[in-house]
Amino acid sequence: MKKLIVAFLTVAILFALQITVSADQDELNKEDYLIMFDGPAEKGILNSFDVEEDDILFKSEILPVYHVELSEQQAKLVDNHPQIKYVEENAEAEAYYQDVPYGIDSVQATDAHSSGYYGQGVDVAILDTGIDASHEDLNVSGGHSVFNNYPDSDPYYDSNGHGTHVAGTVAALDNNIGVLGVAPQANLYAVKVLDSSGGGSYSGIAQGIEWSILNGMDVINMSLGGPTHSSILQAYSDYANDAGLLVIAAAGNSGNAWGVGDSVGYPAQYDSVMAVAAVDQNENRASFSSTGPAVEISAPGVNILSTYPNNNYSSLNGTSMASPHVAGVAALVWQSNPQYSNTQLRNVLNQSAKPLGNSNHYGNGLIQAYDALVH
C-alpha cells in the first residue's frame, strides 16, 4: 500500500512539474500582438486571460487597440472572445530603400545631389519608344508621338520598355523606392519616335527633333541610330544645336572586341551631336561599344539597372544606356549654371571628363557631374 501511495505521489509531483515547466515555457515564448476590440476596449477582458499590466505595451487613444505580449495559448483564447475583432501578430516593418545603380555614382551624380543639384527646371526630351508615364518611379511632364496608329500614337505607352529604361537613368525619382536617376528633378518628355518593336525611321527622328525645338526642350537624348548618313537628319540635328539645345546620342553597338574601325552610327556621327560610348563598372570599354573619331564622351552602359514598364525594373546593356547618363549630368550642370549656352555646357562636360585612354574608344573620357559643376 505504501508503495502505491509513493508511486502515486511521484506521478503527481512529476505531472505538476510538467505543468509548471510548460507554463514557464509558455511564459518565455510570448510574442507581440495587436488586439482590436469590436467596440470599446475593455482591459478587464484581457485581464481575464491573465494578461498582466507589464504585458500591455501600448493602448491606442483613437482606436480600440492594444499592443500586448501574449503566449500562443493566450492569443488563441483571446481570438475566440466575442468582443475581440482582430488578433494579429505584430509584423515587422522596415524603411524602403532605393537602389543607386553603379552608374549614378560613377558619373558623380550623388556628389552633385549632395551639393543641391538635381536637374530641377531642365527639360529633357527622350526620343525613344515612349515612356510608361504610370510608373511609380517616374514623373513625365509631357510628350508627343510621331505615329498615328494606336497604341503607338500614345507617347505614354511603352510596350517595348526601351524608352522607359532610358528615362529612368535620366530622372528616376528620389523617393525611397526602385532606383535613383542621375537628375531626379529634371522634367522628362516622352517623344515617341520608335514603335513597339523598337523600330522607326529618320523621318520620325527628324519630327521628334522638330517637336523638341518647337516645345522649348533643353536637352535631347537619342538612344537610337542607324548606319546610314542623311543630310536631312543632319540638318535637323544642326538646327537643334544652333537653336541652343544640347543634342546627345548613343554612339552605337557595332563595335568589336579589338576596338578597331569607325563604327559610330547616325545621328551620333554629326558634329552637332554628342556621341556617347559605353564603359563597364571598371571603366573599361564595353566590347560592343562603337568606336571612331566621332566618339565624344563615355558613360556606364553595361548591366544598367533602371525603370521598366508596369512598375518593373530591369538591367540592360548598350550605348543606349550610356547616353542618358550624359543627358542627366547635362541637366545637373545646366541647373547649376543656367547662363551657360549649349556650347559652353558641352565644353565643360568634355573638359571635366575623366580621361580613360584611346579617344576613339572613350572620347574625352568618363563624364563627371561634380567635376563639371566646379570646373
Image: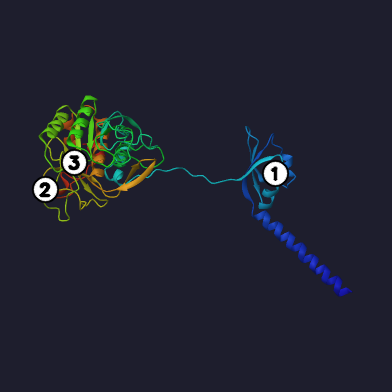
Give 302 or 231, whichever is nearer the viewer: 231
- Dots 3, 2 in contact, CB < 8 A: no
Q: Residue at x 70, y 57 (%)?
A: 24
**Dot 1: what SS?**
helix
* Viewport quadrant of the C terminus: top left
| Nearest to N terminus: mark 3 or mark 2 | 3
**Dot 2: what SS?**
loop
Image coordinates of residue 87 in percent, x first then y, are: 64, 44
Residue under circle 2?
Answer: 262
Q: Residues within 10 Å of mark 2 (few under 14, many from 20)?
A: some
Q: Residues within 10 Å of mark 1 (few under 14, many from 20)?
A: few
Q: Which mark is residue 36?
A: none
Q: CA distance from mark 2 to mark 1?
A: 79 Å
Between marks 2 and 1 in the image, the one whose residue lies nearer the viewer: 2
For badge 3, the amino acid type reads: Gly
- Dots 2, 1 in contact, CB < 8 A: no
For badge 1, the amino acid type reads: Glu
**Dot 3: what SS?**
loop
- In which quarter of the view is residue 365 placed? top left
Q: How is the image coloured?
A: rainbow
Decide if residue 256 is on the left or right side of residue 170.
left
Residue under circle 1?
Answer: 53
Decide if residue 274 is on the left or right side of residue 95.
left
Q: Residue at x 73, y 59 (%)?
A: 20
Image coordinates of residue 310 in percent, x first then y, are: 39, 40
Residue under circle 3?
Answer: 225
| Nearest to N terminus: mark 1 or mark 3 | 1
Q: CA distance from mark 3 to mark 2?
A: 15 Å
